[in-house]
Image (spheres, rainbow, N blue to C red):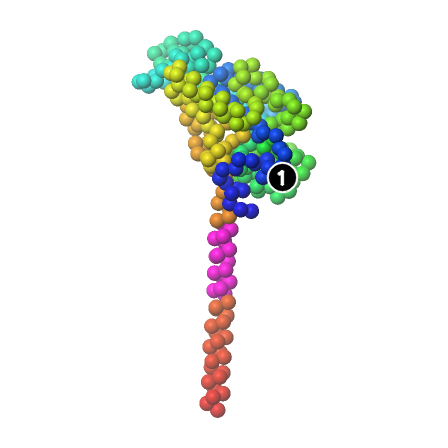
Amino acid sequence: MTDHLLSGVEPDPAGDAGHPDAPPRAGFFTDTSVCIGCKACEVACKEWNAIPEDGLSLTGMSYDNTQGLGASTWRHVAFVEQAAPSPEGRTELPLADAQGGGGPDGPGGSNGAGGDLRWLMASDVCKHCTHAACLDVCPTGSLFRTEFGTVVVQEDICNGCGYCVPACPYGVIEQRPSDGRAFKCTMCYDRLGAGQEPACAKACPTDSIQFGPLDELRERAALRVDQLHAAGVTDARLYGHEPTDGVGGDGAFFLLLDEPEVYGLPPDPVVTTRDLPAMWRHAGAAALSLIGGAALSFAVPALKHLAGTTGRKGRR
């Protein structure tokens, strides 16, 4: 492998994976400013993909009952409740309009106690990275890049080694305790092949989850950020859209209304296999040094012995 295959800008991941006549790369743009937390995407994902029920995990700290992505939760709607005095210069009320209203006691409005209360809701999913470390470390070829540029797990080939789990910079992919195999979002690969959009995007009532050609989604997202900034929502920003970032850009990116850490997202993700070529070079240099040192340790005594033998013969 070469360095550019593991990191950096990659304009055609499907072509690089062996799909010469691939369609435009497909992806998700999730606009969290219009997410209402209905979890229709979670339900649609489970129903279409026949994902097993994984129980209700109420923490007592949130209305969220699924907590995070996992082997049996491929879409997860985060509920982030913020209650604090509004910082000077930060406009909260237009945010309520951007999130679909909510009134004085709803998202973006006052909590009636002199502070501001808002819910930040975001439907998280596998990012389908341009440089997918989970795919790079898979020893069986269970993970592969599709012609749409997405990353899919073939469950019948997965041997349960678990290498992909720590490789993911987002902590998305996970093994099921029942059999040890890894599972994650496939972006409804079977639906894409039939010309349909993924189930989660189809079910979203507010178009918070938008599906389409990735380049078009990036243009649409940039316009949406400008619209929110013009409305006074200055904290709106894109996450995962930049092809020059640590993973080469995500196939599923987001419009956020606060820092990524608030939503449980890493602020500066980097593909975990980026440094593998350099590591192998250093390991090779170290191995050569050890071999050279070992050879020298044997050669020096042998030369001394040979010199001593030659000297004794000369004296005779």
Observer-nearest residue: 285 or 1? Answer: 1
Where is 108 relative to 314, above or below? above
Q: Position of residue 92 (x, y in %)?
A: 38, 15
Residue 183, can we see it? no
| Residue type at tag 1 | Gly
291 inside magenta stretch: yes
Observer-nearest residue: 303 or 26? Answer: 26
- Left or right placement of residue 167 versus residue 267 in this view: right
Observer-nearest residue: 299 or 105? Answer: 299
Q: Position of residue 1 (x, y in %)?
A: 56, 47
Q: Position of residue 34 (x, y in %)?
A: 49, 16
Where is 293 relative to 43, above or below? below
Q: Residue at x 42, y 20 (%)?
A: 226
Residue 277, can we see it? yes
Secondary structure beneath label 1:
loop
Q: Residue at x 46, y 28 (%)?
A: 239
Q: Residue at x 38, y 20 (%)?
A: 234
Q: Which residues are magenta?
A: 279-294
- Left or right placement of residue 129 versus residue 236 in this view: right
Q: Quickly name the residue at label 1.
A: 18
Q: Main secondary structure of the magenta part?
A: helix
Within 10 Å of the Cα at label 1, are there few (<14), some (14-19), or many (20+) other Cα atoms?
few
136 inside magenta stretch: no
Locate residue 158: give its quadrant: top right
